Amino acid sequence: MPVNGNRITVDPITRIEGHLRIDVEVEGGKVSNSWSSAQAFRGIETIMRGKDPRSAWAMTQRFCGVCTTTHALCSIRTVEDALNVPVPVNAHMLRNLVSTMQSLQDYIVHFYHLTALDWVDIVSALSADPATAGKIAESLAAYSPIGKAWPTNSFNAMKNAKDRLAAFVGTKNLGIYGSGYWGHKDMRLTPEINLIAFAHYLEALEYQRKIAEAVAIIGSKNPHIQNLTVGGVSTAINFDSMAALNMERVQWIKKLLDDTADFVRCVYIPDVIAIAGAYKDWFNLGKCSPNYIAVPDIPMNSELTEFGLKGGIIIGDNFREIKTWKDEALRKGITENTTHAWYKNPQDTLHPYDGEQIPSYTDWQENGKYSWAKAPRFEDNVTQTGPISQVLAGYMAGDPLVKKYVDFVASKAGVTIPQLNSVMGRNAARAIRSLLMVDHAYLCLEKLLDNCKTDQSYVNYLKEVPTDKEYIGVGFNEAPRGMLSHWIKIKNGLIENYSAVVPSTWTAGPRDDKGRKGPYEESLMNLPVAEMDKPLEIIRSIHSFDPCIACAVHTIDPEGKEIVNVKIR
């Protein structure tokens, strides 16, 4: 992490998916300028050309090693939209289950294993009193939306966690923790709360595994599920057959969901609120674009007219609900700009249907091209997506479930809804959405069981791709990290062009042709930097977005070098 005068370069940013470089200039103890640079070239969109569109989902989920399921699902929806292929209700319910449960895994991993270490001083936990920690942990039930105490929030559990930590530190080899900013001036939690967070960090490993297992039962494999097909799923439904999705497997899925739901409600939510209480000023730091975009998701019928989650577009003070994926303004309003991205396009701004990925790597140029990520815009507005966009759109659209959980978390944290547009607010929004995913997973499981009493169909197979004309389509998905869209052109039965506009492209993108910063860059402006050689504040803001740069840019390092993330930063 080079520091040169007032310039800090953090490369690589770790505890993310992919390769990201952040540069900032600091004046008077605050960030005065910033650059977000995705450091690897995506090649998959180009690889897709000439392929059978029915196989697109299997390849595009290789964009990422974390959000594989969301890319697979979005890709399937893209082809179904282009070719107007109906999908049975049961298939939608199984897809929804995979989507909601994968989101739960993502949120648990993000908070505990990727971002908590920005706020939790693990080494400080060595001086904690386990008895005091146990009592504090028991009191966290007040922050649970179901008011339930977690059974391992006890003296014995805290003592065991402290002993494990002491044994690890005693080896004098902290491994991935060795480069943490322990003892930083802005690490504020008491040793006891640090110990509680560390104990829950260890438990979270088990619960993210449980919900990943539930995804694998439906998807046949996780990551990179194998059960999708254009027109539905290949997961046969027969409650009386051992070779299909039967009642035994459904009950297995429900048990894994029950366990994870309890962890989310009784541990994850209270931990977020408790940590936020010590860093309340961070609800006023890291603000970026006041424009948000989210699409409706969790389809509940074959006609795609009913959705479990509402969508909408917020531009400043104006809100418009998106009620369908066919919304013309939504489809027409998205563009990508490459003025500061390493691509050679016929023009700087293109619609995704026409987007190209012709690499044109130079070097890192402060006023020129400096990133492999493009700069998406909606109707020429810098717009952010992600859990904050999802919950704000649902709140503005009057979704009672969203309102219930937003009001609960905001009141317990003592903040207003506009303050969610902040570093700590993004973490809170993700926690809110985890509660929504729990409830919608149960609703979809219930609807699947109810519908299967009279109808166990699960697919409308597309036997062949029509070759009579050009077809275009777009698939949308509210991925864990925000709105995802895949765009396709099909000609002569094969893919002519393919483009993916992913959540991290919206947020991690560079400046556009008008010099406007992307959300990552905006969020860093005016952030305090207490220690130039330990820019913890920068890391906090970037991690609050749950960056997945592998989705934004993927596959090839332009210089052919292997990139290895070795430090906790």
Image (cartoon, helix red, strand yellow):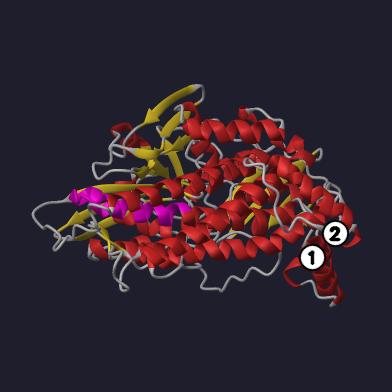
Disc number for residue 400: none
Disc number for residue 125: 2
* Stretch of the chain drawn in magenta: 77-100
Image-quadrant location for residue 276 = top right
Image-quadrant location for residue 377 = top left
Q: Is residue 68 visible?
A: no
User: Mark 2 or mark 1, which has the lower sequence index?
Assistant: 2
Could you say where residue 395 lies in the image, as x and y percent from the top left? 50, 30
Tell me if residue 252 comes above or below residue 485 in the rendering.
below
- Residue for point 31% across, 36% down: 324
Q: CA distance from mark 2 to mark 1?
A: 9 Å
Label 2: few (<14), some or many (≥20) within 10 Å?
A: many
Could you say where residue 351 lies in the image, as x and y percent from the top left? 33, 43
Check the picture and name the quadrant holding the C terminus: bottom right
- Residue for point 81% across, 40% down: 29
**Which residue position is annotated with label 1?**
161
Residue type at tag 2: Ala
Q: Are marks 2 and 1 in contact (CB under 8 Å)?
A: yes
Could you say where residue 83 lies in the image, as x and y percent from the top left? 18, 51
Residue type at tag 1: Ala
Principal secondary structure, stretch drawn in magenta: helix
Say whether residue 83 is magenta: yes
Check the picture and name the quadrant holding the N terminus: bottom right
